[in-house]
């Protein structure tokens, strides 16, 4: 298959072409380099005109290139598996969306993404806490426990829904405390869906690099404050994948 395609990784500001090594997606050793238009550049590599399967390996290869470029540049990540048919098509994209990309680069200048997931460590303890602290749930459990006959299916459903509702209130309350502590040190944030009963927070924070140390310190303070009940998983810095993900549709005005 002819390598006539150009795989796009990210858009940066640059006036002269640079190379980033043979780290292109597909494990073929394709050289990653930048293609310039005025003071913009698109980071690309040669590729067959084929769709890449969404796999951990391919996603990591895509992200690895962007992370490498981020060492020296502010980056605008391009959506996974965006392939142009030619160099001219890439250059045309930069020309047509020049002002849009320049504005985005200004807003992302010197910004990085930090991820934070927070988990309850002991769910038995949490369920016990909500069972005794929430009056409605406590009364409902005592009412069902005090009867001689076993609860009906409908009663079990009602109890389960009340437990779920009370757990969600506790999750939101504890997550909000963490968010309000970190919010003053971030430019923007995204709250992703929590997974499983024990996840309290699944957030990503856009941070100016000059405030990264202060943000790190705040996370450490929260970790120590809640070390008996919460587990913090803190990752980054990373490119701003959750805040910019350029979606390019060829032939539709790019």
Image: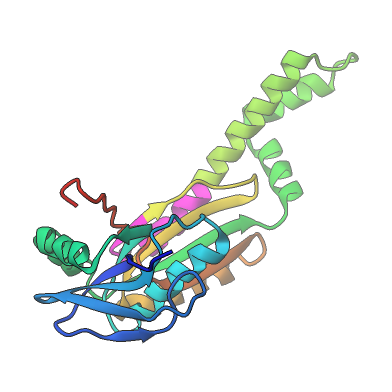
Kindly identify the residue that appears in the image at 38 percent across and 81 percent down.
Answer: 31
- In front here: 140 or 10? 10
Residue 174 is one of the magenta-drawn residues: yes
Quarter of the picture containing the N terminus is bottom left
Residue 147 falls left or right of residue 236:
right
Q: Can residue 161 be seen here?
A: yes
In the figure, 48 relative to 195: above or below? below
- In front here: 180 or 242? 242
In the figure, 89 relative to 129: above or below? below
Q: Can residue 185 be seen here?
A: no
Picture quarter containing residue 15? bottom left
Magenta span: helix, strand or loop, mainly?
Answer: helix
Residue 138 percent coordinates (x, y): 70, 30
Residue 6 percent coordinates (x, y): 32, 67
| Magenta segment boundaries in residue numbering | 173-189
Kindly identify the residue that appears in the image at 19 percent across and 68 percent down.
Answer: 105
Residue 148 is one of the magenta-drawn residues: no
Kindly identify the residue that appears in the image at 55 percent across and 46 percent down.
Answer: 171
Numbered label tally: 0
Picture quarter containing residue 84? bottom left
Residue 77 falls left or right of residue 221:
left
Residue 158 percent coordinates (x, y): 67, 20
- In front here: 88 or 133? 88
Colour scheme shown = rainbow
């Amino acid at each position: 298959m002819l390598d006539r395609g150009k795989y796009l990784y990210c858009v940066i500001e640059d006036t002269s072409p640079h190379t980033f090594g043979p780290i292109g997606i597909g494990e073929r050793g394709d050289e990653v380099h930048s293609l310039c238009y005025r003071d913009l550049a698109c980071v690309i590599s040669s590729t067959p005109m084929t769709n890449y399967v969404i796999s951990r390996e391919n996603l990591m290869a895509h992200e690895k290139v962007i992370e490498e470029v981020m060492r020296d540049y502010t980056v605008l990540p391009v959506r996974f598996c965006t392939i142009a048919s030619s160099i001219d098509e890439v250059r045309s994209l930069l020309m047509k969306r020049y002002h849009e990309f320049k504005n985005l680069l200004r807003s992302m200048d010197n910004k990085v993404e930090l991820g934070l997931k927070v988990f309850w460590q002991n769910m038995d303890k949490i369920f016990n806490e909500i069972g005794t602290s929430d009056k409605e749930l406590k009364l409902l459990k005592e009412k069902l426990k005090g009867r001689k006959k076993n609860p009906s299916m409908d009663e079990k459903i009602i109890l389960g829904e009340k437990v779920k509702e009370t757990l969600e209130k506790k999750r939101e309350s504890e997550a909000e405390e963490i968010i309000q502590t970190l919010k003053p040190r971030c430019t923007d944030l995204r709250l992703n869906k929590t997974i499983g009963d024990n996840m309290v927070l699944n957030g990503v924070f856009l941070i100016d690099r000059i405030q990264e140390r202060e943000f790190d310190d705040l996370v450490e303070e929260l970790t120590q404050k809640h070390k008996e009940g919460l587990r913090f998983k803190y990752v980054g810095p990373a490119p701003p994948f959750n805040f910019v993900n350029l979606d390019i549709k060829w032939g539709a005005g790019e």
